[in-house]
Amino acid sequence: MDGITRVREFNRTVTERIGALDDHYLARGRPLGQSRLLWEIGAAGPEGAELRDLRERLGLDSGYLSRQLRGLEADGLVRVEPAADDSRVRVVRLTEPGRAERAELDRGSDDLARGILDPLTDRQRTRLLDAMDEVRRLMTASAVEVRVVDPAEPAARASIDAYFAELATRFDVGFDPGQSRPTSDDEFREPQGAFLVAFLHGTAVGCVGVKRRHGDEYAEIKRLWVSPDARGIGLGARLLREVEAAARRLGAASVRLDTNRTLTEAIALYRANGYVEIDDFNGERYADFWFEKPLD
């Protein structure tokens, strides 16, 4: 079977086994979509969940979300109202019956999980749980969207700030951006460069930039960062592939970068992806290693 056929068979097996086809999910009188919304709203805490965050996190369009929430409101389980600090923002909160219903859904979900695991041997349970963990990681990886953004956009600025903050805690001598070789926003804009941000459910979880000076055969990779929340799913390697493709579009024959000796994961990533150590090419005061990779 080809990959698409196997994915579709997996989807059919899972949706049937967890009861996603039943309009009365877990015998609670509502479909899975509304049940999931109740869970997500409750997970946001007493402050409630902003509707725009729910749309981003669950990948729902506005019309579908509105219809589902109207059904939950009609049952007295949620309340949709303006945010206390900004009337333009709509927030949804669980009512007291909604919190009770969510607790019942939690109990039913636990029972469903036991029903899946109990018929299996210990060895089968271990295999299934390990496979589920791997599928969850890979499905998360496939949900990440990497796109070119302007380096002055809020998502780009927030990613760079998080990157600098992490360097300050990891470098032996701390990190002061003012003491590092500067890179202006214009250097990360076409035709000189590009800046990429990785988004997961609308939240920035990684970034990387590339710049090429006129006349240089190589392009320089800068600001490669992955949020701690998105590590372990191969995002660093993906950002490298994406930024290498951007460097090719800039006409570069190779890419270069520098890194600090404390960033052991980054050093391992570069070496595993075909980067070879070279001499200092840029005089970066915080760098201990310099790498280069030829582009096909």
Image: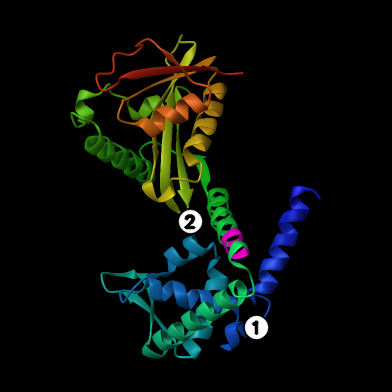
| Residue with the mark numbered 2 | 201
Most foreground residue, 149 or 252: 252
Task: Decide: few, some or many residues near mark 1? Use Cα within 10 Å; few <14, some 14-19, many ≥20.
Answer: some
Q: Magenta span covers which residues?
A: 124-128
The number of numbered discs placed on residues in the rendered structure image is 2
Q: Looking at the image, can residue 61 be seen?
A: yes
**SS at badge 2:** loop
| Front position in the image: 128 or 281 | 128
Q: Residue at x 71, y 67 (%)?
A: 13
Badge 1 element: loop
Relative image position of residue 20 (x, y in whole percent): 64, 75
- Residue 107 location (% of width, % of height): 48, 83
Q: Quadrant of residue 173?
A: top left
Task: Tell me, yes or no, whether the highlighted magenta stretch contains residue 135.
Answer: no
Residue displayed at 40% across by 34% down: 265
Quadrant where the C terminus is found in the figure: top right
Tell me the kind of residue under disc 1: Asp
Q: Which residue is mark 1?
A: 23
Magenta residues: mostly which secondary structure?
Answer: helix
Q: Is residue 30 visible?
A: no
CA separation, marks 2 and 1?
A: 26 Å
Residue 56 at what x, y percent from top left? Answer: 48, 60
